[in-house]
Image (tube, rainbow, N blue to C red):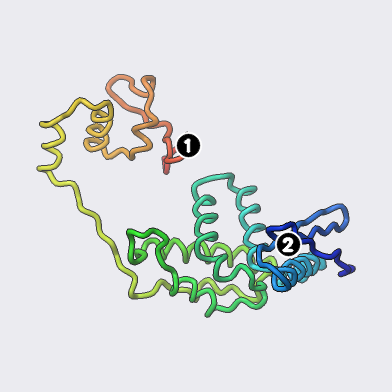
Amino acid sequence: MYKQLPPPKWNGSKWVLSVMVDRQRKQFTSKTPKTAGKREVIDRALAWLDSLDGDKSAVFVSEAWRLFLDDYVKRKGENEQVIQLRSLGALYVLPALGDVKCGKVTIEMLQAVLNDARPHRRDKKKLSKKYLSNIKGAITTFCRWGTPRGYFKTDMSPMLYVPKSAETIGRTILQISDIEKLFKHRLGYWYERALLLEVLTGLRPGEVLGLKIEDYKDGIIFVRRSINARKKVTAGKNK
């Protein structure tokens, strides 16, 4: 396949390079000024052309991650998992590895993403062990997707680990005395009955919010749906 590229153009805020091959158009951009940004969009375009030739190891991680998410959505839909993958990728994976070609990625680079991960919220000093496990899970899923497709030479995911220094942040369990306060000192807010129902039954917040009048019949409450933090109605976490 030809590698003759049109010259990138600076539009005042970023470099833009548009390439069309077999009626398939791809646009590459970079906000890096001067020659460095120009070289960046050219390298990305050449890597994309290489991927069309079958050399997927030349594709940048940022492009492979985008294709990975697109494929995930096609297979499983726009669910909570893909939202988490998109977020973890944007916060941790892509800033560290986005401009690295897949064939150049090593286990040390992937492990460094976990070792160097820091909170993005000012009120948090460290990431919990669970959150680091989520980052590890995102990288693992990406590797398992990319390896059989030729982006990575070997599956490096089994060799990743969560740093031992990661903290396990516990939660304060609701005590009997706290439950008594909920029932004895009600303030009349509309959500109090929903909260009491949640405490007594163990229903998740989204399941309580998803209840309808027709879900109650003959003394039985049927949990048929849940509403998540994005106000999307789902089937619930499990049956």
Does dot 2 land on a helix, a strand or a loop?
strand
Q: Measure the alpha-carbon separation of dots 1 and 2.
A: 41 Å
Residue 110 locus on image (x, y percent): 53, 74
**Total marks placed:** 2
Q: Which of the two residues, 42 or 139, is positioned nearer the viewer here? A: 42
Quarter where residue 103 is shown: bottom right
Quarter where residue 168 is shown: bottom left
Instruction: State whether residue 156 is above or below residue 31.
Output: below
Does dot 1 land on a helix, a strand or a loop?
strand
Instruction: State whether residue 224 is above or below residue 166.
Output: above
Q: Which residue is mark 1?
A: 234
User: Which class describes the residues within 10 Å of circle 2: few (<14), some (14-19), or many (20+)?
Assistant: many
Instruction: State whether residue 238 is above or below residue 217.
Output: below
Residue 41 locus on image (x, y percent): 74, 66
In this picture, residue 68 sits left or right of residue 206: right
Residue 15 is labelled as 2
In this picture, residue 172 sits left or right of residue 112: left
Q: Which of the two residues, 151 or 13, is positioned nearer the viewer here? A: 13
Identified at 42% across, 35% down, the residue is 226
In this picture, residue 228 sits left or right of residue 55: left
Amino acid on which disc 1 is placed: Thr
Residue 90 locus on image (x, y percent): 54, 59
Quarter where residue 164 is shown: bottom left
Identified at 40% across, 61% down, the residue is 131
Q: Mark 1 and mark 2 in contact? Answer it, CB < 8 Å.
A: no
User: Which class describes the residues within 10 Å of circle 1: few (<14), some (14-19), or many (20+)?
Assistant: some
Q: Quadrant of the C terminus?
A: top left
Residue 178 locus on image (x, y percent): 13, 42
Amino acid on which disc 2 is placed: Trp
Identified at 45% across, 71% down, the residue is 114
